[in-house]
Image: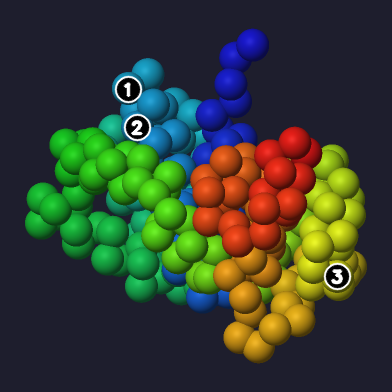
């Protein structure tokens, strides 16, 4: 089955905008990594899927697509960025993108080098200190659209409640972290991270103090 890279790029761009508004530095870096990786694949093919986003109705999608299109079709990209630079939420970012490209800072080679470095950083996530850092920095309010494996969210909520009662609140359109301890215990932070990012269960379980909870998330 063919992967819809355009749809993935749009999703990452929208999550990037949300992360920025929520001052979520971890989420912002993750979204940039995802966009870099998707854009790199599209550019290797011919860039047409990015070109199709230059007229997208959402500004952040147009902005990010145009930034990467500078590496494929500069004329089209500069036209879009110039329009965005005339006003709106991202006029400064659009102008800066053009300047970086003119100065030769933004090239396909720099994108590849940056992606290689980010891949190295991503691989270190299985180190305990990085998992704990992520658990403590993740936003305390996450929209349902940004929670992984949403279909099993209620199952994970039930598991967490067995060990840490009521530390996760389910609201209209989002989940929130409401730890019982102040500051939150390490296990509470890790439970919240697992609720949001269940694919990290193995790495998270390596840092848990509660052995029973460790077994529970490994078997969930």
Percent across and percent down for residue 88 are 51, 72
Q: What's the residue at 63%, 79% (across, down)?
A: 184
Residue 46 drawn at (x, y percent) = 36, 21
Left or right: 204 in relation to 34: right
Residue 165: mark in rendering: 3
Question: Looking at the image, do the residues carrying marks 1 and 2 touch, with CB atoms under 8 Å apart?
Answer: yes
Numbered disc in front, either 1 or 3: 3
Foreground of the two, 43 or 198: 198
Q: How many marks?
A: 3
Q: Residues within 10 Å of mark 1 (few under 14, many from 20)?
A: few
Residue 181 at x, y percent in the picture: 70, 83
Tell me which residue sits at (43%, 54%) in the image: 128
* Residue designated by label 2: 40
First of labels 1, 3 by sequence position: 1
User: In the drawing, what numbered circle is on residue 44?
Assistant: 1
Q: Is residue 96 above or below residue 122?
A: below
Tell me, yes or no, whether the two marked residues, 2 and 3, touch with CB atoms within 8 Å: no
């Amino acid at each position: 089955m063919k992967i819809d890279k355009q749809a993935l790029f749009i999703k990452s761009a929208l999550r990037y905008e949300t992360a920025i508004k929520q001052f979520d530095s971890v989420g912002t870096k993750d979204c940039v990594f995802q966009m870099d990786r998707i854009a790199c694949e599209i550019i290797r093919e011919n860039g047409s899927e990015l070109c199709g986003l230059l007229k997208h109705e959402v500004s952040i999608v147009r902005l990010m697509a145009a930034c990467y299109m500078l590496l494929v079709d500069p004329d089209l990209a500069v036209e879009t960025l110039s329009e965005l630079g005339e006003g709106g939420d991202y006029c400064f970012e659009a102008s800066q993108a053009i300047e970086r490209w003119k100065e030769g800072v933004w090239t396909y080679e720099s994108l590849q080098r940056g992606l290689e470095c980010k891949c190295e950083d991503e691989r270190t996530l299985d180190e305990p200190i990085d998992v704990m850092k992520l658990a403590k920095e993740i936003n305390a309010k996450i929209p349902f659209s940004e929670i992984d494996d949403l279909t099993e969210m209620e199952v994970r909520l039930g598991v967490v409640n067995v060990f840490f009662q009521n530390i996760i609140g389910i609201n209209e359109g989002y989940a929130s972290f409401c730890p019982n301890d102040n500051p939150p215990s390490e296990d509470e932070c890790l439970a919240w991270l697992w609720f949001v990012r269940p694919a990290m269960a193995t790495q998270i379980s390596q840092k848990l103090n509660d052995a029973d909870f460790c077994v529970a998330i490994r078997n969930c």
